[in-house]
Amino acid sequence: MAEVTARTRVDVRDRATWTELFYDLVLAFGVSQVAHVLALHPGWSQLGSCLLVLVPLWWAWVDVVMAMNAVHETNMQRVFLLLAGLATYGMCMSAQHALETRSEALLYAGSYLALRLLIGEAIRRECAVYTIHPYRAGLAFALALFGVTALPDQMRTAGWAIAVVAEILAPLVLSGHLRQLAFGVNHLPERFGLFIIIALGENVVSVGAWVGGRHLGPTELAAVALAFLTGCGLWWLYFHLAASAVAHALRSHPTPAVVVRDVLSYGHLALVSGLLLVAVGAERIVAAPTATPYRMAAGLLPVGAALFTLTFCYTRRRMFGAASVTRFAGGLALLGLALAAPLVPGLVTLGAVAFVLVAVNGLEHWLLTGGRHVPLIFVRR
């Protein structure tokens, strides 16, 4: 993939605006809708369907962030975000059944097309050069999604999948055009960090919503506590070191567009996907902590935690040329737990996942506070 140069800007706002936070509330609703579908019917086909619905939501959110990150807030930009929120709300409302019924597919794809038209206009106002780049190209994929809704039911999912995969690959194919955009190096890390908070919140909400109003015995209380501890461990993995590392990379990397594309766009999609799996897996374990989950349902929690942990190896290598041994080993340990999960009660798996996350964070804290270096692998030469 081509290395690209990009202009960075530090003379833009440093913090998210209230309008952006309101827009994020809509995305929080969408994340919960996607997680709810997988929680009801855990399976490989359902997981694939959830990803097909999640990716357009994610990519549109990324492009809204990119359209707003390097400009000062005005009333027109507030109107844009509110209209974008309305279009995104339509996508979220239809997310659960977008691949099942034509009416829901039309609502989802139509809302996505409207959102893409809004993003295209916002990008047009900010870019002096009129050419194709990954954010304008999203309009073509929205049109494709809208078109496949007319296909027969058995063909709709296949057409949808092709359009979504093409949209995922667009930033790689059109990466050279990212140099036209200016990146707010203070604003972007905060915006993507806020989305991680949204995804982490799904773990809290899903578990809390299930236990609300129910009588909890000692086993259920232990499961709830371990689920919360797991969320704390995942939060620490990201916000203790990774969030500040992203901000540093945007300032210091010779090609900051690579950080935006590979770390923020692709890397954070993997992080959010991992957190959704964790939320669904934790909810199912808390619902029946002494039962042994069946097949795929058993591995949702450790696989999600492993995906989240191992993604940091990829993002750190893209930013600094190396990955940490601690997180690589922790991710492998979590994958090992996923293999054993169908053989043991869910509470055992939940406790083991929490232990691994606490151990990784504790080891990194011990190394750094003692003036030692975290061992690295995959050093780029």
Image (cartoon, helix red, strand yellow):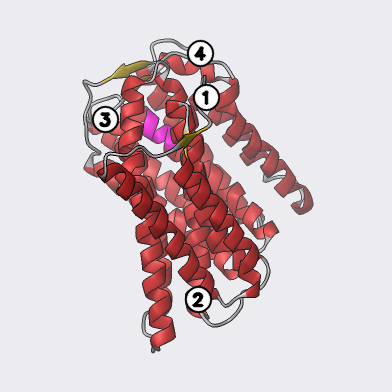
Contact check, label 4 and label 1, Cβ < 8 Å: no
- Marks 4 and 1 sit apart, C-alpha to C-alpha, by 10 Å
Dominant SS in magenta = helix
Q: Position of residue 213 (x, y in %)?
A: 36, 84
- Marks 4 and 2 sit apart, C-alpha to C-alpha, by 54 Å
Give the left or right position of residue 366, taking residue 95 as reference.
Answer: left
Contact check, label 4 and label 2, Cβ < 8 Å: no
Residue 134 disc label = 1
> Where does label 4 land, which residue?
131
Quarter residue 119 falls in: top left
- Marks 3 and 4 sit apart, C-alpha to C-alpha, by 27 Å
Contact check, label 1 and label 3, Cβ < 8 Å: no
> Where does label 3 land, which residue?
186
Q: Secondary structure at mark 3?
A: loop
The mark nearer the N terminus, 2 or 1, is 1
Q: Is residue 65 on the magenta stretch? A: yes
For label 4, the crowd category at 10 Å Cα-Cα, with few meaning under 14, some 14 to 19 and many 20 or more, is few
Q: Which kind of residue does numbered mark 4 sit on?
A: Thr
> Where does label 2 land, which residue?
347
Q: Nearer the viewer, residue 206 or 360?
A: 360
Residue 323 is at least partly visible in this image = yes
Looking at the image, which residue is at 39% across and 75% down? Answer: 224
Q: Which residues are magenta?
A: 62-66
Q: Secondary structure at mark 4?
A: loop
Looking at the image, which residue is at 54% across and 42% down? Answer: 56
Give the left or right position of residue 325, taking residue 253 as reference.
Answer: right
Looking at the image, which residue is at 46% across and 70% down? Answer: 351
